Image (cartoon, rainbow, N blue to C red):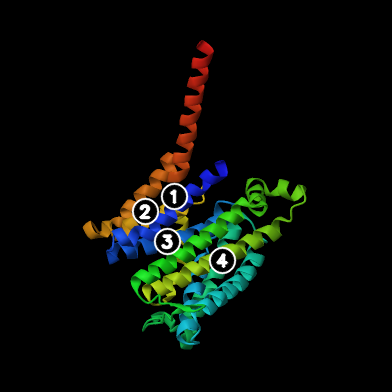
Amino acid sequence: MKRIRSYWPWIVSIGFLLVFPLFVPSQFFINNVTEILIGALFGVSLNLLVGYTGLLSLGHNAFLGIGSYAMGVLLREANFGIPATLLSLFLLSGLFALFMGYLSTRLTKFYFAFLTLALSQIIYIIIVRWVPVTGGHQGLIGGIPKPPIQLLAWSVDIGSRLHFYYFTVVLVCASFVLLKAVVDSPFGWVLRCIRENTLRAQFIGINTRRYTVAVFVISGMFGALAGGLTALNINGCYPDHAEWIRGADPIFMILIGGMNNFFGPLLGAGVMVFLSTFLTTYTRYSPFFLGVILVLLVTVVRMGIIDFLVLKKGIWRKAVNQWKTRGDSAT
């Protein structure tokens, strides 16, 4: 029964995403939900390192750039189909993540973080300098084709905004299911063990570096998928996708939503899209409000929103149980 209850949030969330365009057909809101889903995937992929393994990567933007340009170049220049492009995207990002993770995991703490930042700049320089392929500073202007997806006898066109929304929902939800299975598996619990005490994990026979490289590869591949969806969503690829400052976006999502809950980055992505989209309509100071939220979370709450709510729920439940226990003993 408890196992069935654990699926209800997934069923309700997926059902909401499927019927949302039917009740709110506005292109504006559909675009915003699409951005939230892509941003959430980017944040959740990084949280495998930050929240579950205890590794702060400042170079996750590299995978956003790899995924973005892999999607754009292969669709526009190589005339690949969507399935072949996605497969190639995972392969390219996985190889670079293996290289980046192998070098970075030789170090720890701040040294690890800054080495990932330095390695991510290699991708940025390649994008800027490889002008015949990437377009240099201008990026891949002129649009990215979205060929129909062939599914047996059916052909699915993702060219329209609504169809692309459902395409994003399917890919992001499938990614969430896979990543949730990873963190709930024995592999995920080993990652938690490494996060809590790396030295003790080594003493009990865990090859910590092998696990950290493996999770780095998984994180990079799904971060690249977010980059590919970003390129299709904005119909272009630009060097700022791989710029170092973009590496702060998923970190902000994790800090706002909470790193100890799988769906924390999803809430963080929603808050960031709201601030950047809705508040800019009424004020030019949306970055100020984002800064205020981060300062409050870091200095006052000292945890993400979902982490705070889960903690308060546990405290409230404990108080109720104590009250019931005292009432039973009194009678």
Give the residue pinned by disc 2: 271
- Mark 2 to mark 1 CA distance (whole Å): 8 Å
Mark 2: secondary structure:
helix
Task: Name the quadrant of the N terminus.
Answer: top right
Crowding near the residue tagged with mark 3, few <14, some 14–19, many ≥20 C-alpha atoms within 10 Å: many
Earlier residue among tags 2 and 1: 1
Q: Which mark is residue 118?
A: none
Labelled disc at residue 257: 1
Name the residue type under label 3: Leu
Residue positioned 35% across, 53% down in the render? 290
Q: If you read the primary sequence from the N terminus, does the residue marked by circle 3 or circle 2 appear first? A: 3
- Report which quarter residue 236 is drawn in: bottom left
Along the viewing direction, whichever of 92 and 121 lies nearer the viewer:
92
Residue located 52% across and 76% down the image: 83
Q: Which residue is mark 4?
A: 220
To which residue does mark 3 refer? 37
